[in-house]
Image (spheres, rainbow, N blue to C red):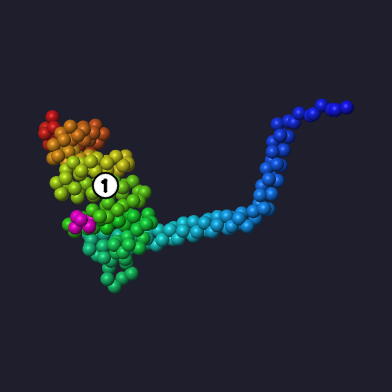
Amino acid sequence: MLTKKKKLSKKEIKEDKLVSFYYKSYGYITENSKQVLSYLGAFIVVVALVAFYLNHRSQQNKEAGVQLAKVMSLYDGGAYLEAIEGQAGTNTLGLKRIVEDYGSTENGETAKIYLANSYNFLGKSDEAFKYYQDYSGSINIFKATALAGQAGYYADKKDFAKAADLYKQAAHVTKEDVLNPDYLLHAGINYLNSGDNKSAKEMFDTIKKDYASSTANREVNQYMAQVE
């Protein structure tokens, strides 16, 4: 006499599938052991290389930070040429060398901003522009500085529309930047110089609305008459 086939529970079905998957997997690995081991070996090598790379980058970033700290006294003291080239007879690397050796690290990216500023202070705008444009670090304040530095370059070249757009971008990188009202003021002035009075008025209105206590707000009135 045939007995009624027992209906499997959900748990039993799940367990049955798991057992089936296990034996299928085991069979595949057994039959293709060389290929599997080859893939596993390659994966381990990749993981090891990534770990080595990250550790190396971390060490390089620390070294860049040490070198940057040494040179900052020259920069802060206004010795911009020495800050760029380094101090003769000492182990203080210049900003240019730091960028060359560590430019792909975060501290190396920071060095690009100070290097660009130094060239700017020395009147070497083309060199400054190159490093402002090359900045790709993650620090928002420096992102804004890089954009404003490029804006200043275009303003000097009388490309006022380009300068205005870049100053506007700089003002919107982060709300934490105390220079935002100044960036907006420069954006407005350059829009004004490019003949775009509407955009200039937007910049000036934003200053009066959002930065009423800023120095830029005290200066903006002299330009408002030209756009109203």
Tell me what residue is drawn at x 71 percent, y 42 percent.
Answer: 19
SS of the residue at dot 1? helix
Query: Magenta stretch containing residue 127, yes or no?
Result: yes
The quarter of the picture where the C terminus appears is top left
User: Residue 86 appears in which quarter of the rendering?
Assistant: bottom left
User: Residue 182 appears in which quarter of the rendering?
Assistant: top left
Tell me what residue is drawn at x 27 percent, y 58 percent.
Answer: 115
Image location (x, y in percent) of residue 40: 59, 55
Q: Nearer the viewer, residue 181 or 191?
A: 191
Q: Is residue 183 visible?
A: no
Q: Nearer the viewer, residue 192 or 175?
A: 192
Query: Magenta stretch containing residue 199, yes or no?
Result: no
Tell me what residue is drawn at x 11 percent, y 34 percent.
Answer: 226
User: Is 117 rendered above or below residue 191?
Assistant: below
Residue type indicated by callout 1: Leu
Image location (x, y in percent) of residue 80: 23, 61
Image location (x, y in percent) of residue 103: 34, 58
| Dot 1 alpha-carbon crowd within 10 angstroms: few under 14, some 14 to 19, many 20 or more | many
Q: Is residue 8 left or right of residue 197?
A: right
| Magenta segment boundaries in residue numbering | 124-128
User: Is 183 rendered above or below residue 96?
Assistant: above
Residue tagged 1: 147
User: Is 66 rendered above or below residue 140?
Assistant: below
Q: Residue furthest bottom?
A: 89
Tell me what residue is drawn at x 63 percent, y 57 percent.
Answer: 34
Image location (x, y in percent) of residue 52: 49, 60
Magenta stretch: helix, strand or loop mostly: helix
